[in-house]
Structure formats: structure tokens, C-alpha cells
Image: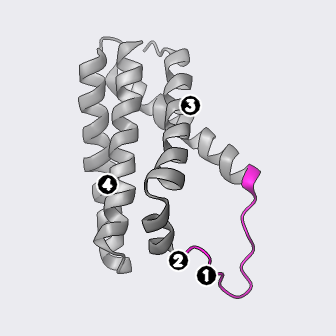
């Protein structure tokens, strides 16, 4: 199977920056409230910013790589957009939903996180399909 690694890298980069805007600008306040940001459990160590950013980019490259594999070499932008969006919602978002039900997390929290994954996979699919 042929994979366009430039498209994978561009898609991962888009996901990285979309995550920044989603969680720090668009939904910053409601998301921070939902996760209890600012409330530090006793003995908790703050995560390393470098580890968070580097780790998230590596994971986004892996997600884009798998999405490129699923789409195949004959995908176009529309197939990428639709397939990515469906994977983001049905696979990732719904899996989050199961966990959130058992963890007692709110619908708002789920909508923010599932919405991000739906949009980010759709955008990655669009980029991979278009390139």
C-alpha cells in the first residue's frame, strides 16, 4: 500500500494546531471547567509541556498514518472528509461516550471532546484525500 507521508505529516500538523485552537480558544472555558483545571489533587505532579506537545504530535502522526491506510491510495477529498468524520464520531467519539457514561462525566464534556475528534479526523481525511 502506498501512503503519502507528506499528506500524513500535513494532516498531523493540522490536527495539532486545531487542537490548540479547540481547547485554548474556542472551548477553553467550558473545557477547563469540565476537567476541573486549576484544582490540583494532592501529590499530583504537573505534566511536562514538552512531553505533552511532543507526545500529542507523535500520536497525531500515528492517527493520520492509520487514516491514510484506511482511506487507501484512491481516496479523494470528499471520501477523506466523510470517512474521517465518521471515524472521529463513530469510533472515537462513541468510545469516549461509553467511558464517559461509566465515569459519570457530563454530556458537555463529551460534546467538546467527541466534537474535536470528529472535526480533527474529518480535516485529516480531507487533507489526506486531497493530496
Q: Which residue is mark 2?
A: 36
Instruction: Give the mark nearer the N terminus: 4 vs 1.
Output: 1
Whether 127 is drawn above or below 74: the answer is below
Q: CA distance from mark 3 to mark 4?
A: 21 Å
Q: CA distance from mark 2 to mark 3?
A: 28 Å
> Does the CB distance between marks 1 and 2 fall below 8 Å?
yes
Q: CA distance from mark 1 to mark 2?
A: 6 Å
Instruction: Give the mark nearer the N terminus: 3 vs 1.
Output: 3
Stretch in magenta: 37-50
Q: Which residue is mark 4?
A: 93
- 42 falls in the magenta region: yes
Q: Which residue is mark 3?
A: 13
Q: Tell me the quarter of the picture where residue 82 sits.
A: top left
Q: Main secondary structure of the magenta part?
A: loop
Crowding around mark 4 (Cα neighbors within 10 Å: few <14, some 14 to 19, many 20+) is many
Crowding around mark 3 (Cα neighbors within 10 Å: few <14, some 14 to 19, many 20+) is some
Amino acid at each position: 500500500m502506498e501512503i503519502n507521508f507528506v499528506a500524513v505529516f500535513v494532516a498531523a500538523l493540522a490536527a495539532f494546531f486545531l487542537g490548540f485552537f479547540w481547547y485554548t480558544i474556542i472551548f477553553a472555558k467550558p473545557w477547563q471547567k469540565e476537567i476541573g483545571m486549576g484544582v490540583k489533587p494532592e501529590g499530583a505532579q504537573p505534566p511536562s509541556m514538552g512531553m505533552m506537545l511532543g507526545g500529542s504530535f507523535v500520536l497525531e502522526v500515528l492517527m493520520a498514518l492509520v487514516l491514510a491506510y484506511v482511506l487507501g491510495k484512491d481516496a479523494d477529498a470528499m471520501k477523506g472528509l466523510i470517512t474521517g468524520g465518521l471515524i472521529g464520531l463513530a469510533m472515537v467519539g462513541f468510545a469516549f461516550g461509553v467511558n464517559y457514561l461509566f465515569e459519570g462525566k457530563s454530556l458537555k464534556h463529551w460534546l467538546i471532546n467527541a466534537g474535536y475528534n470528529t472535526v480533527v479526523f474529518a480535516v485529516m481525511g480531507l487533507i489526506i484525500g486531497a493530496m
